[in-house]
Image (cartoon, rainbow, N blue to C red):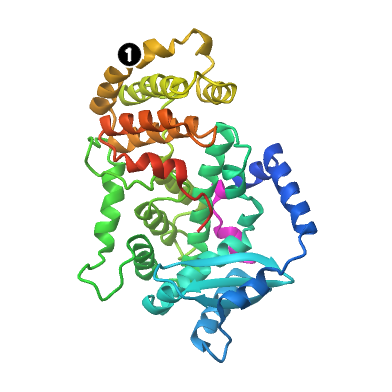
Amino acid sequence: MSDPASEIRCDNDLKLYQALLAHPKVRRVRDTIEKQEEKRKGPGVRRHLLSTSVRLSRSMSGPLHVMADRCQERLGIQSRLELYAYPAPQFNAVCFKPEDGRVFIMFSSSLLEAFSEQELLFVMGHELGHHVYRHHEIPIGYILRGKTRPSAALALDLFAWSRYAEVSADRAGAYCAEDLPSVARALFKLASGLRDDTVVQFDLDEFLRQVDDMLALGEQPGQGAPMQDWFLTHPFSPLRVKALTIFDCSVLMRSGGIDKHKLEDQVQTVMGLMEPDYLKGKTEATRAMRNLFVAGALAVADAAGGISDKERQTLEEFFEEGYALEKLDPERLRELLPKRIEAAREKASLSQRMQVVRDLCLVAGVEHPVAQAESKLLEEIAQALDIPTGFVSQCLEASPELD
């Protein structure tokens, strides 16, 4: 395999990445950032790291540099690599944008202390995956949190891309570690914050059963319920492990494994749990979700001083061509909202209801800050759907940056 990093990259990551780089809004933001960096005369990334963290030289941390050597060789990275550590109780690692031919990875002290060698190989390979795939060329946080909010369509594309970008980075980490149980254990630690010396014992099969329960066609409300992180930019950890389990069974990791096309099809099925296309579906569940979204979106947009031009544009992007927005009566739909919530509770699973609330938050979030009346209505809808109200603030405030 002449270029293993390119071979293992998730197809949907690459496809969405290329489309986003060509998007006019993304291009404008990238141009703005580039001009700002040219004007800025302050110290660069390396200077900042040297002054705020500890550089881990090869003499200080030989084993960690051996891991770095392996990752560079496996992923075909020629750039010089510098490793840093900083004090923090949270497990975290970050790969910074290259500077002067150097690539920088910073680890929290707690992560270095709590992770085994194979787990660290996964984390390091994951961060270098973001580098080798140039994921930071798309300034997702800048776009989603800038003064001028993106359209709902672009926001959804950015969310979808970032989840597939994490899948690619996970594959890079797994390709470096070559030890699926350790990779899964690393993701469990990152998600839970737990160490090996706690009373909780990690069980890979149990972790994967969470995803199998979600994939079951007969999912009932309250069963196999996903975590609140589901519909944000990062995939829910069991989904990431499931996607990596499929990757581990592919020809990219073992002779005689499933081919790349089948791998991507199966991974898309798993990731599809986070992206149900209910606005065009024909099942009872998708109809209930669609009806709830229409009523909820109009009610939320109208909750604070009427529907603005930005909100109207966002709604038009969501609705099918058959919907005539000007003919929809917000007051009448507000009256119908309780019945539509009840129908969604009866027909749609918890994960499906969370998807609708996430999209309602996107409608509200086109204008920042979100009006108190809109936020209050969103929380009332979530509560009526048996969704923790904290999910609303999580959707409205979550960091979109790649991990």
Identify the residue position indicated by label 1 in the image.
335
Binning the other alpha carbons within 10 Å of mark 1 as few (below 14), some (14 to 19) or many (20 upward) gives few
User: Which residue in the rendered view is the most extreme toward the bottom?
Assistant: 59
Q: How many marks?
A: 1
Q: Is residue 7 left or right of residue 287?
A: right
Above or below, comparing residue 327 to residue 317 in the picture: above
Is residue 27 highlighted in magenta? no
- Image coords of residue 280 (percent x, y): 45, 23
- Image coords of residue 204 (percent x, y): 28, 62
User: Is residue 280 among what the camera can see?
Assistant: no
Q: Residue at x 43, y 24 (%)?
A: 300
- Image coords of residue 377 (percent x, y): 36, 28
Above or below, comparing residue 328 to residue 155 in the picture: above
Q: Is 337 in front, or is 207?
A: 337
Dominant secondary structure (helix, strand or loop) of the stretch shown in magenta: helix
User: Is residue 148 among what the camera can see?
Assistant: yes
Is residue 11 highlighted in magenta? yes
Q: Residue at x 24, y 72 (%)?
A: 198
Q: Secondary structure at mark 1?
A: helix
Quadrant in the picture for the N terminus: bottom right
Q: Residue at x 52, y 23 (%)?
A: 315
- Image coords of residue 170 (percent x, y): 48, 60
Above or below, comparing residue 219 to residue 106 in the picture: above
Q: Tell me which amino acid carries mark 1.
A: Glu
- The residue range painted magenta reads 1-13
The quadrant where residue 240 appears:
bottom left
The quadrant where residue 331 appears:
top left
Q: Is 61 in front, or is 258?
A: 61
